[in-house]
Image (cartoon, helix red, strand yellow):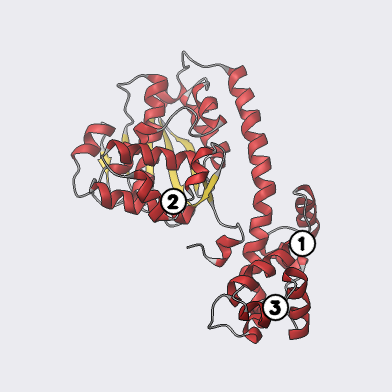
Amino acid sequence: MQTLAQAGGGGRTILVTWVKAICRALTAAGCDSAALVAEAGVDSKLLDNPTARCLIAPVSRLWRLAVAATGDPAFGLKVASHIKHTTFHSLSYGLCASSTLKEAFERVKRYCHVASDAVEYEFWRCDSEYHFVIEPAVEVADEPVDALVAAYLRMCRSLIGHDYSPLRIEFRRALPARIEDFHGLLRAPLYFDAPRTRLVFDRDSIERPLDGGNPELARQNDAIALQYLSQLERENIRGRVRDVLTQRLARGEPSQAQVAELLNMSARTLQRKLGESGTTYKEILDETRRVLALAYLSAPRHTVSDVTYLLGFSAGSSFTRAFRRWTGQSPSDWRARGG
């Protein structure tokens, strides 16, 4: 079930194509992927739209259910083999067209939010080594991070050669219950209980020109990625404002300037971003209150006075007028009629 914040559309997201990769791995393991998707609360209709995005929470539940169903500590690594060229939208093609692995990892860092805004990356040179760090922005299970490690290692091998291996791989996770598949699939020195999840590469391999490099094709896919991210940002600003309102309304109605400050931007910048996304602060405030009002009034433990307070209205009459505008009924009548 969605939280109230998620009901408003906020929260970090991931491309639904990641879910499809998990489903393919589940099917290969002999599991009922459709049943597990339903149990996790992922909307199965989204799977038909390759650009749709899922909230992280139900996808995290799917990961947990998948690991339990397969009983495989290396399930995350195996999901990587079910990733297709279209899984990461235009980013996949930009990576394939990169002129060096260095350029590919820089592209990952720059456009990673195409795939998900729940993970950040760091990439830098240290003497004769290059370090690539995978840093989840939210608390996640071990397996999705394992999948990312395996996915980027597969990217390297597809670009530079099947036998390539990094100097070492460090996992933040604990030593898995069975280690054989980790060694067999990754074929590199492995370290667990490390401070961060990190792949360490030799400089020569990272900087070596790739036979399949195509700068023009890479630039075209970068442009598509930028366009996609711009659209995502326009959608995300609405969600970010809704998240703040959901958390702050019980303390009284916050002003646009206060919300902007909480989002680390000026009021003018927030107004511009909302304008670019085709909405206003007042419209988001009104819609957030409407969604929350219906949710709160559906819970018997909340009185109408409670809901008035939780939505930041200064008086019950103000809430009643707003609710009549939303539903054509008073809050008490709406509740009495079962919504």
100 versus 294 height, above or below: above
Q: In the displayed structure, does residue 182 sit left or right of residue 42? A: left
Q: Tell me the CA gap for discs 2 and 1.
A: 30 Å
Q: In the displayed structure, does residue 170 sit left or right of residue 244? A: left
Of residue 113 and residue 166, the one placed in the foreground of this image is: 113
Residue at image position (64%, 30%) is 224
State the residue position of label 1: 283
Amino acid beneath label 1 = Glu
Residue at image position (52%, 17%) is 213
Q: Secondary structure at mark 2?
A: helix
Tell me, yes or no, whether the two marked residues, 2 and 1, touch with CB atoms within 8 Å. Answer: no
Residue 206 lies, in percent from the top left, at 43, 25
- Indicate which disc residue 59 carries: 2
154 versus 297 height, above or below: above
Q: Secondary structure at mark 3?
A: loop
> Is residue 129 visible to us here?
yes
- Indicate which disc residue 312 carries: 3
Q: Tell me the CA gap for discs 1 and 3.
A: 15 Å
Amino acid beneath label 2 = Val
Q: Secondary structure at mark 1?
A: helix
Q: Earlier in the sequence, mark 1 or mark 3?
A: 1
Amino acid beneath label 3 = Gly
Q: In the displayed structure, does residue 76 sit left or right of residue 88? A: left
Q: Earlier in the sequence, mark 2 or mark 1?
A: 2
175 versus 152 height, above or below: below
Q: Quadrant of residue 75?
A: top left
Of residue 139 and residue 83, the one placed in the foreground of this image is: 83
Residue 98 lies, in percent from the top left, at 52, 22
